[in-house]
Amino acid sequence: MKSKVTTGTSGIIFDMDGVISDTQDLHAVIESSVLKRFGINLSPDEITARFAGVGDKVMFSTLFSEHGVKIASFDDLVTEKWGLMAQAVASHGVKPIAYSLELIELLSQYGFVLSVASGSPRAFIAQVIETFSLQKYFVCCVSGEEVQHGKPAPDIFLEAAKLMGLDYDRCAVIEDGLSGMQAAARAGMGCIGLVKDLDKKYPASVLVTSLREVTPELALSVMGSLAPLQ
């Protein structure tokens, strides 16, 4: 396919859960169930709105602190959550977000450098990428385990750009979570926010309700539009 736009050396960084795979809803349902045992009642939608892309320990510690629940360690909770995730994926499989696979192929054909930056563990990222046979499209995958600070800190996106060999202003992020959009803004990267409600305010360069709205031209248009936030 001959490119109709000039990408130069430009990159697209994909969040995974809720952008490539439908696993964000699965995260939230399982987290809601685990939290309920401790008297913390949050719906999956509430969890997604606040904590999509946020590391498990940060999410659990924040909510336990807010609700005055004390626990010696969050390690067992995190292990429990990922055990339940593995069981759910084994039982029901993983489905792609509508048009995500087609978009990845399209952007690759147009010459963009592609990567994944997700708060999920590396093993889970690899499982999803392999399930959809996407290995050939991504030059790197960065997990929250590999950076000092998870989203909404910019570390994960800056690390992805570094591994892609690109400056921050030559990258665009595709995100569905508030914390991920904040992280992209703090990294100075233009961000395409995949959201359900366009009437809500999000810290993204542009909002879409479907990945079908994302074009190479749109991705290029958001690059270099922001300076890194402090």
Image (spheres, helix red, strand yellow):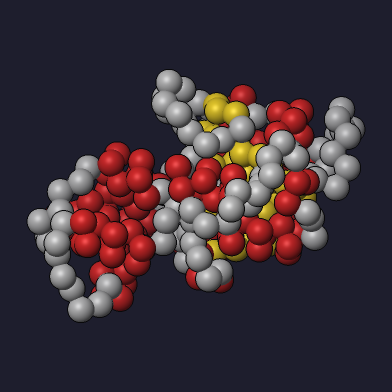
Image coordinates for residue 67, horizontal then vertical, percent: 16, 57
Name the residue furthest top.
199
Question: Relative to 6, does residue 172 appear above or below in the rendering?
Answer: below
Residue at figure coordinates x 68%, y 40% from the top left: 226
Question: Relative to 126, does residue 227 appear above or below in the rendering?
Answer: above
Q: In the image shown, does 100 or 153 lie closer to the viewer? A: 153
Residue at figure coordinates x 85%, y 47% from the top left: 9
Judge left or right: residue 81 versus residue 217. Answer: left
Q: How many marks?
A: 0
Q: In the image shown, does 205 or 228 lie closer to the viewer? A: 228
Q: Quadrant of the N terminus?
A: top right
Judge left or right: residue 49 versus residue 169. Answer: left
Question: Relative to 221, does residue 160 appear above or below in the rendering?
Answer: below
Q: In the image shown, does 58 or 19 lie closer to the viewer? A: 58
Residue at figure coordinates x 27%, y 54% from the top left: 30
Q: In the image shown, does 228 or 144 lie closer to the viewer? A: 228
Residue at figure coordinates x 71%, y 36% from the top left: 225
Image coordinates for residue 128, horizontal then vertical, percent: 52, 56
Q: Is residue 49 visible?
A: yes
Name the residue furthest front.
230
Q: Is residue 21 visible?
A: no
Image coordinates for residue 62, horizontal then vertical, percent: 29, 59
Q: Quadrant of residue 68?
A: bottom left
